[in-house]
């Protein structure tokens, strides 16, 4: 399954990248994130990996995030690996003025087991809505300092 989401954020490109490319800020806009561990490489550079620990609906799980391409400030691409799912996320950042950017997120989900294959077929909107939620959560954090974890 492949789809694209987009959001406008009222920040200049430099301020946006400073907030977006800081792993310490993830907890403010990725709901359920409890911790992260550095796994490989130089943090923030292509090929580096981190393990992201989440708890959603009282169920713990983790993702391995790999930076597949970093050409900041205009693009930053990731892959994510989890139990049953591999995903590719291409993020593009375009300044449309001195105080506003457009963040375009292209996402592809590749199921690696039967359960996830069925979920993608039956509930594709769930994945699309989750991406939109993350984009909106980041906008709220970046523009207004609002944290999804209510303790900034």
Image: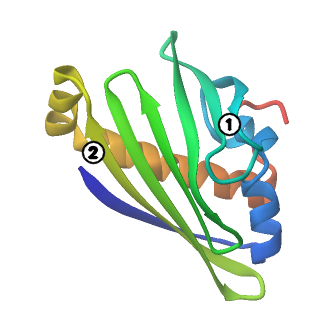
At which x and y percent is residue 16?
75, 66
Q: Counting other residues with Cα less than 10 Å from the Cα at mark 2, is it few (<14), some (14-19), or many (20 or more)?
A: few
* Residue 151 vs residue 97, the one in the foreground: 97
Mark 1 and mark 2: Cα distance apart in space: 21 Å
Please, is residue 27 above or below residue 22 in the view?
A: above
Residue found at x 52% / y 10%? 58
Labelled disc at residue 53 = none
Disc 1 to disc 2: CB gap under 8 Å: no
Q: Is residue 106 left or right of residue 13?
A: left
Residue found at x 55% / y 47%? 134
* Residue 29 vs residue 35, the one in the foreground: 35
Q: Is residue 46 left or right of residue 117?
A: right
Q: Quadrant of residue 13?
A: bottom right
* SS class, disc 1: loop
At which x and y percent is residue 65?
56, 38
Q: In what quadrant of the picture does the C terminus appear?
A: top right
Colour scheme used in the picture? rainbow
The residue at which mark 2 appears reads as 125
At which x and y percent is residue 140?
69, 54
User: Can you name the residue that lies furthest to the bottom here?
Assistant: 97
Please, is residue 136 above or below residue 121 in the view?
A: below
* SS class, disc 2: helix
Labelled disc at residue 148 = 1
Of mark 1 and mark 2, the one earlier in the sequence is 2
Please, is residue 112 above or below residue 87 in the view?
A: above
At which x and y percent is residue 120?
21, 37
Residue found at x 26% / y 29%? 112
């Amino acid at each position: 399954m492949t789809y694209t989401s987009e959001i406008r954020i009222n920040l200049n490109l430099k301020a946006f990248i400073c907030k977006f490319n800081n792993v310490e800020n993830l907890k403010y806009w990725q709901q359920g994130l409890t911790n992260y561990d550095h796994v490989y490489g130089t943090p923030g550079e292509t090929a580096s990996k981190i393990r992201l620990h989440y708890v959603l609906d009282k169920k713990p799980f983790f993702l391995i995030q790999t930076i597949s391409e970093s050409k900041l400030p205009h693009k930053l691409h990731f892959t994510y690996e989890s139990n049953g799912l591999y995903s590719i996320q291409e993020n593009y950042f375009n300044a449309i003025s001195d105080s506003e950017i457009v963040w375009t997120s292209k996402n592809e989900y590749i199921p690696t087991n039967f359960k996830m294959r069925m979920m993608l077929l039956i509930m594709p909107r769930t994945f699309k809505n989750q991406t939109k939620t993350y984009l909106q959560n980041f906008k709220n954090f970046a523009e207004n300092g609002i944290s999804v974890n209510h303790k900034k």
